[in-house]
Amino acid sequence: MVNRRKFIHASAFGSLGILFSKIAAGNQVPFTIKGKPVVISTWDAGLEANKAAWEILHKGGRAVDAVEKGVMVTEASQNCCVGLGANPDRDGFVTLDACIMDEFSNCGGVAFLERIKHPVAVARRVMDKTPHVMLVGSGAQQFAIAEGFLLEEQKLSEQAQAAYEEWLKNSQYKPPVINIENLPVRQAGKQGHGPFAPHKLSNGEWNHDTIGMVAMDTHGNMGGSCTTSGAGFKMRGRIGDSPIIGAGLFVDNEVGACTATGQGEDVIRVAGSHSVVELMRQGLSPEVACKKVIERIVKIKKAKAKDIQVAFLALNKKGQAGAFALHPGFRYAIKSGDKETLVTSKSWFNE
Ligand code: ASP
């Protein structure tokens, strides 16, 4: 017979057990404030992507769901820059990288993934359904197929096909500076199509090889995603910053979130997105935090900084957005209840 004392003892430990198992599962809300939702994303393609994210955010949905759906718009757009129609590697294969992170520090990534339309959705499954953080190559593809994703045929967009054919003429791997203003020159072929060159879309907007998105939902919780075809005409097997948690993306629900675009190798070198978030933790604004990490890259690269582009885009817990790039030309899209616009980032090098 269970006496009263034993019953209280058992139920106290019973509820503690439930509490501990929830913490162990990593799904206790760590920090919750009510806030106004906001979503920001890299480059002009972010405008459309933000709209899809907003559909979820304005109804009170989770930031992590919003950033997944948001960047899927860009992945599906069959342009030259993100997703299956994007610039291939130097052997002609499109290989995709993506990652996602939520308010509980759950995260997932895929890299060197071929013939799957939505790498970010596979990254989400890695996060939700496996004990791992990252799957790559044929293992990532095998997992995607097991999860019901279709194995698609690779079909380069017209722009990617043209850019690849142009590149094959010299087959030189040299990252150019991203600079939207001088693109007509580059598009005319004088500088060639480089691995990090943005591209003009049919609707007249500029796009780039990556979309990174971070958001805050109505509960004040944050999430982020990043998806890319990586550097155009890269060596086969090359992976950049975009699928790497801490480099191309980082979310800390107590502080804020950051994503990166540009030359991945130099973002990885400084654990870019993580470094930005840590600087925001010390009280710096998103823009100043992004600037400090760009300065770190300049210090490392010295004169070579003029040859590469890197940009960081960050959002803090107050819903303030900020960015900083190495070179002029980086733009980001922002959407909130009362704002939907493209913002031109400040940069270390001047116009
Ligand atoms: N960061 C990406 C990479 O290095 C490229 C980009 O942003 O265009 O793969």
Image (cartoon, rainbow, N blue to C red):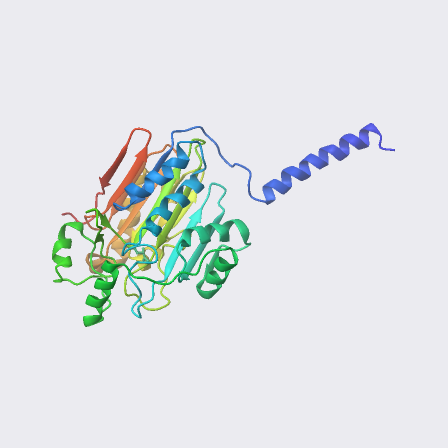
Q: Residue placed at 37% from the left, 59% from the top?
A: 96
| Quadrant showing the N terminus | top right
**Front in this rendered view, residue 114 or 38:** 114
Task: Tell me where residue 23 appears, x and y as whole percent.
Answer: 59, 41
Q: Quadrant of residue 24?
A: top right
210 with respect to 11 (left or right): left
Task: Tell me where residue 143 appears, x and y as whole percent.
Answer: 50, 59
Query: Is residue 231 positioned above or below 260 on the image?
Result: below
Q: Residue placed at 52% from the left, 49% from the top?
A: 128
Q: Quadrant of residue 7?
A: top right
**Front in this rendered view, residue 111 or 291:** 111
Query: Is residue 235 positioned above or below 201 on the image?
Result: below
Q: Quadrant of residue 50?
A: top left
Q: Residue placed at 24% from the left, 67% from the top?
A: 173
Query: Is residue 197 positioned above or below 26 on the image?
Result: below
Residue ranking furthest to the right: 1
| Residue 82 visible in this rendered orientation of the protein | yes
321 with respect to 119 (left or right): left
Task: Tell me where residue 108 appears, x and y as whole percent.
Answer: 47, 52
Q: How many marks?
A: 0
| Residue 282 visible in this rendered orientation of the protein | no
Task: Tell me where residue 191 appears, x and y as whole percent.
Answer: 14, 62
Query: Is residue 293 positioned above or below 93 on the image?
Result: above
Ligand 1 is found in the corner quadrant, namely: bottom left
**Front in this rendered view, residue 304 or 264:** 264
322 with respect to 123 (left or right): left
